[in-house]
Amino acid sequence: MHRPVCTDGRFPVHMSRRWPSRPIYWTFIVDEHAMPYPSTRQPCWPPSLQTRRTPDGDRRYPLIWRPVLCGALAFFVSQMLLRLPLMSVVVPMLAEPVRGWLTSAPVASLSAGLFEETGRLVVMVLLLQGFRRWIDGIGFGLGHGGLEAIVLIGMAQVNNLILALVINMGRWDQVASQLPPDSARIRETLVHTSPVLFLAAGVERIASITIHIGCSLLVLWGVYRGRRLLAWGAAVLLHAATNLMGVWLLPVSPYLSEAGLIAIAVVVVVVALRSRHRFAPDLIRPATAHLGPPAEPVAPDPTT
């Protein structure tokens, strides 16, 4: 089978069906004295799929886009297709004691952790076989938390920004006729809400994305080290505890809730930066150790 050779002499990850937790790297023999990238030779991957490179020209994080997409898919399936329809359609149809118990803050927080972390684990096992690098967990968390931020906060913030521009331009009366009957309440809310609260919403999403990255790294570590159940349970508890803390502290003070999320996010960042060695290596060096020195150039024959 023909295998394309990259400029740096290495082909990216090949997935192993027998050992899905162990990535297989195709390594090629290249001339160690060849010109490093960039050169006249073209790499085997399009430039759009290449990320940062090491100083000697090696791709540091190939195929980083796939964990990001899988993280977004995990959130879409676990929350938007499964949990949210169940909480909004099925739960209101239940009797009052059960309905009140399922919609309580502890149970709702735990259900969010169960659905999202289970979806995270299933997607990593089925769709990310061989992707066990530290940067894969970072990308997975960015995709998961990024889509959540877009769905929960991003769309609402864009809508509020448009309405605020309409109010500042003095055209609210022209637009109010096309809005719902409670448009007056919407206007009063936007006028009397402090801009700091809108900024706090963005800070809260950044902290939430950081916590999603931490949960993704935790689950990925369990998949890579063969401790899936332990890592999944720890991620569920971390997710549920974070949600529950935010719900309980929000009535006391929104700023106190934000401070709690930021504190957890800082701890997650510190632990994540110190855990990089516990995942699969980012690169496999080209096999050039046994290559001999380059052949001496042959001087041209003056008689010819």
Image (tube, rainbow, N blue to C red):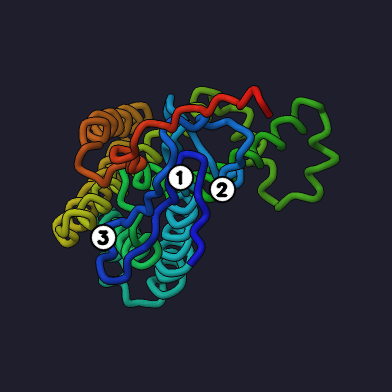
Q: Sort mark 1 into few (<14), some (14-19) or many (20+) by Cα contacts within 10 Å.
A: many
Q: Residue furthest right?
A: 174
Indicate which disc residue 45 carries.
2
User: Which sits in the foreground, 232 or 223?
Assistant: 223
* Residue at x 26% of width, y 41% of height: 245
Mark 3 to mark 1 CA distance (whole Å): 17 Å
The secondary structure type at the circle numbered 2 is loop
Q: Write down the residue under mark 3.
A: 21
Q: Is residue 238 above or below residue 230?
A: above
> Marks 2 and 1, how far apart in space?
9 Å
| Viewer-side residue, 51 vs 229 | 51
Q: Pick the residue in front: 79 or 287.
A: 287
Tag nearer the camera, 3 or 2? 2
Mark 1 lies on residue: 62
Three-letter code, disc 3: Ser
- SS class of the residue under badge 3? loop
Q: Residues within 10 Å of mark 3 (few under 14, many from 20)?
A: many
Answer with the quarter of the image where residue 285 lies: top left
Assess whether mark 2 and mark 3 are in contact (beta carbons under 8 angstroms): no
Percent coordinates x, y for residue 41 in the rendering: 61, 39
Q: Which one is earlier in the sequence, the residue at label 3 or at label 2?
A: 3
Q: Are marks 2 and 1 in contact (CB under 8 Å)?
A: yes
- Please name whichever residue, 92 or 288, is drawn nearer the observer in this view of the structure: 288
Q: Residue at x 53, y 28 (%)?
A: 298
- Name the amino acid, label 2: Trp
Q: Earlier in the sequence, mark 2 or mark 1?
A: 2
**Marks 3/2: CA–CA distance:** 24 Å
Q: What SS does tag 1 mark? A: loop
Q: In the drawing, does residue 54 fall left or right of residue 98?
A: right
Tell me residue 79's x, y (percent): 43, 61
Q: Nearer the viewer, mark 2 or mark 1?
A: 2
Left or right for 45, reference 224: right
